[in-house]
Amino acid sequence: MNIGLTLIAQALAFAGLIWIIATKIWPPLLSAIEERQKKIAEGLAAADNSQKALAQAQQSADAAMREARGKANEIIDQAHQRASQIIEQARTEALAEAVRAKELAQAEIATAATRAREDLRRQVAVLAVAGAERLLRREVDASAHKALLDELAAEI
């Protein structure tokens, strides 16, 4: 065989191989590569969007935490104010109760003093009658005795 014929046959086989590769293998391979590149680009875009969404979610979570802390502090302040009001109200009620108890005690003291004076007047009247009886050496009857005691009590 001849080198020229072998070379031509190899060239024709090579050309046929190139034509088969260019028409049958290369287009599906390119479409697969392009599809893979699109998926990679979409994945990168999705990752970027996810990072942005994560950052926004973190910011909104931080904002919600700040708002919740603010509300919690406000509620705590209101609770402290209410506690102060309750303490002040209890203090006022205790003072009012103490004043009422003092007035009641003073009224009881005045009543007891009045009773003691009346009792003392009766005792003085009894002593006066006893002294008068000794002087007169006679006993006064009960109705006269009562009238005399009432008269002495009225004078005293």
Image (cartoon, helix red, strand yellow):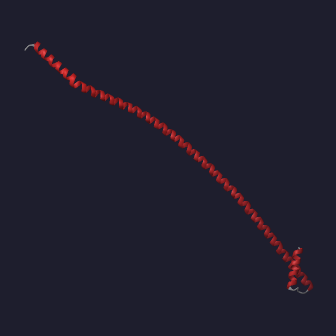
Quarter of image, res 17: top left
Determine whether, in the image, residue 13 is placed left or right of residue 125. Answer: left
Q: Position of residue 121 (x, y in %)?
A: 85, 75
Residue toward you, 24 or 111: 24
Q: Residue furthest right?
A: 136
Residue toward you, 50 or 114: 50
Above or below: residue 76 compared with residue 122: above
Residue at figure coordinates x 42%, y 34% from the top left: 51
Above or below: residue 37 compared with residue 151: above
Q: Position of residue 128 (x, y in %)?
A: 89, 79
Q: Position of residue 38 (x, y in %)?
A: 33, 29
Q: In what quadrant of the picture does the N terminus appear?
A: top left
Residue at figure coordinates x 14%, y 17% from the top left: 10
Above or below: residue 130 compared with residue 34: below
Q: In what quadrant of the picture does the C terminus appear?
A: bottom right
Above or below: residue 97 compared with residue 5: below
